Image (cartoon, rainbow, N blue to C red):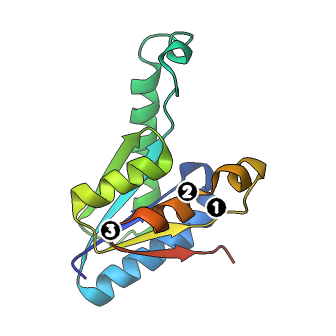
Amino acid sequence: MKHILCAIDLTHLESEGKLLQTAADLAKFYGASLSVVTVVPDYGMSIVGSYFKEGTMKSAVETANTQLHDFVKKTLPEQDHVQHIVEVGTAYEMILDAIRRSNADLVVMGAHKPNLMDKLQGPNSARVSRYAPCSVLVVRPV
């Protein structure tokens, strides 16, 4: 194991601390590098984006980047050299893209209680597990 990627959902930070700590512990155990990715949802269709003022998406990405850095620093205060990745798009697609680009050997991600839409479409963790070119560890909240 050389590189571990941890997928963080910034809308569930109360449960993501354990997830990030698990990824950091595995990285330390294996002597692997650690990257942390989060995904900002896009507008879905360009017409939807036309209802927002110019620069809204750029501001959302900058805010997500700041939140991700703050969360990692707070959760892993002694961890050095964590790569922070902020993607824009569909969560599972962007996580799969980050896996490929970072050459991750392992993905660590959380599983949240599914809502109705998850049951119809399938949760992100299931899709990433199905299509990832590497192992995926799904950490459930306690």
Circle 1/circle 3 CB separation < 8 Å: no
Mark nearest the camera among 2 and 1 is: 2
Label 3, on which residue? 133
Q: 81 and 32: which one is in front?
A: 32
Whole-angstrom CA distance, mark 2 to mark 1, is: 19 Å
Query: How many neighbours does mark 3 have within 10 angstroms: few (below 14), some (14-19), or many (20 or more)?
Result: some
Label 2, on which residue? 124
Name the amino acid type tagged 1. Glu
- Residue that appears at 39% across and 48% down: 94
Of the 4 image quadrants, the one containing the N terminus is: bottom left
Label 1, on which residue? 14
Sequence order check, earlier mark of 3 and 2: 2
- Residue that appears at 72% across and 47% down: 117
- Residue that appears at 52% across and 28% down: 44
Residue 38, image x and y in percent?
Answer: 44, 50
Of the 4 image quadrants, the one containing the C terminus is: bottom right
Task: Indicate which disc residue 125 carries.
Answer: none
Whole-angstrom CA distance, mark 1 to mark 3, is: 29 Å
For label 2, the SS is helix
Name the amino acid type tagged 2. Asn
Q: 20 and 91: which one is in front?
A: 91
